[in-house]
Image (cartoon, coloured by chain):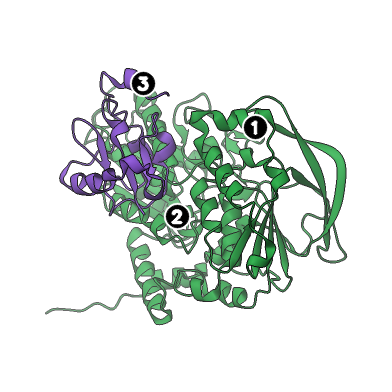
Chain colours: A purple, B green
Amino acid sequence: MPHIVTDKCQRCRFTDCVTTCPVACFHGDAQMLYIDNVQCVDCGACVPACPVHAIYEQSELPPDKLEWLAINAQRAPALPIIEDKQVPLPTAEARKRELGY
Amino acid sequence: MSSGTDAGSLGSAGNPLRVAIVGSGPSGFYAAEALFKSPVTVRVDMIERLPVPFGLVRHGVAPDHPRLKQPVLVYDKIARSPGFTFLGNVTVGRDISVPQLQATHHAVIFACGAESDRRLGLPNEDLPGSHTATEFVGWYNAHPDYRERSFDLGAEAAVIIGQGNVAVDVARILCKSVDELRTTDIAEHALNALAASRIRDIHIIGRRGPAQASFTFKELRELGELPGCVTLVSRSDLDLQPACVAELDDRNNFNAAKNVEILRSWATHSATMADKRIWFHFQQSPVAMAGTGRLERITLERNCLTGPPFGQSAKGTGATFDLGCGLLFRSIGYRGLPLPGVPFDSLKGVFSNTAGRIGDKPGLYAAGWIKRGPSGIIGTNRADAVATVQSLLADLPLLDARPKPGAESLHAALAGGSQVLAYDDWRRIDAEEQRLGLVLGKPREKMTRVRDMLALAGSKQESCHDG
């Protein structure tokens, strides 16, 4: 059961998650990150690392975010691996507050 | 002050930065990875006291969690980097000293983990029947140091003191049927002993409340999903004080909130629902252990919680009760071991350090559990090791810039002593373990004796001459 990055990552893209991944399974485009569900070993280390809790285990996905399972599976393999922390988007802090964190 | 030498500045091709990494678990490998990704030319010599690498990923992660062992594929790739040398079966502090490493390398990173465990500090703690989770886990995971341990699984009840993921692993392995474990890489000697187990009740006892339990919620939840087992929690334990409720309301503390949610969902379970029962007890601490020749009973004291949210501590109330107990595992935290030549913080059980830097002279560093204590999971060590390497690289201008001899001189110093294993020797052991496992229907059967590993490594390889 893989872990999934949801739309809360958009307009943030903090990338704190990638620093905790033991198997480098995060991929990213300019907007957000995605988890390769084949490489993900379900360790859960990334979940508490995200400042806005954008990552969910599949069984914990809120009903309105179920589509993100397929989106991560489709997009991740085609995008470059992100292994190192990057600078968040300029809108990150505002988005974090907006999300209640 | 270091300046260029005839060979070139430190970190150039003519004068590579030579780093010795002590320990071959996750933090050691993530430190090596961070070094190889840095802009300087670096040589990494990884020293491991066992003949085989990978630390707790090999000897800690439970056999029924095979996916969590996948990181070894990442470590294998790092080990194949040019400039990486593995030296197995070498004990720093015995075969080689820290000052020697400082002479042969520009910097040393200790990534040697926390091999010991915290004690309860009670008389009779070492009576037969009183064990540590460390030794039980090492035993079922085929760690050579624990091969000869034995556990009397003939009693119907076992007590585990501690409420973290290691306690959960112990409970789960004791609860699972032999059929469920038979196809994992659990040590065959453990499988045989567990096949004879009569344990039906497992009591997991913590000194604080549900909101302070250290489990990651995924691991806790899994206990509630074991076939043939029922998890039991009393409703009164789930009646939380305001300070605990405040802790759970903090959005950043959602692991604790999930733990409590899971525990609450178990409050409707009853003991008759299954043949094996896992009981959770909160706000209790063992204060005495007794028995004649072996552990027979423990005395538990009820605790109250005092303090502010996130500062809740357990305070004994004086109310005690006895529990008949013949098998106990303490699982209250691993603890690092000191090493001559390295400042040790005996309160925390770590090498004294600031941002991974040990001591006031540059050159000694720590990563992983020996740096920050035994917390977190495999991936937690990656960010930790990256930060240590950042400290090391920032110190480059302060290190002795003269070229260092590195692994070559280590091999010379160790020649005539105990056998040093190379990474290729691990590959042969790996292949042999998989071959042995195939026969038994397991992914591998781990070799459990150092002498067998050394013999395999030392044996002449049959070569196929193609002309």
Q: Which residue is mark 1?
A: B244
Q: Which residue lies at the image location 32% right of the left edge and 22% below the top edge?
A: A95
**B439 and B403: which is toward the camera:** B439
**Labels 2 and 3 positioned on one and the same chain:** no
**Contact flag, marks 2 and 3 (Cβ < 8 Å):** no
Q: Chain of mark 2?
A: B
Of the residues tagged 2 and 3, which is closer to the observer? 3
Label 1 is placed on what type of residue?
Answer: Cys
B21 shown above or below B230: above
- In the current view of this chain or complex, which residue is farthest to the bottom? B439
Label whose residue precedes the other's in the sequence (2 or 1): 2
Q: Chain of mark 3?
A: A
Of the residues tagged 2 and 1, which is closer to the observer? 1
Give me the disc on residue B337: none
Cα–Cα span, label 2 and label 1: 34 Å
**B298 and B270: which is toward the camera:** B270
**Contact flag, marks 3 and 1 (Cβ < 8 Å):** no
Q: Which residue is mark 2?
A: B57
Q: Which residue is mark 3?
A: A98
Q: Which residue lies at the image location 40% right of the left edge and 29% below the top edge?
A: A51
Cα–Cα span, label 2 and label 3: 39 Å
Please identify the quadrant where the N terminus of chain B is shown.
Answer: top left
Mark 3 packing: few (<14 Cα in 10 Å), some, or many (20+)?
few
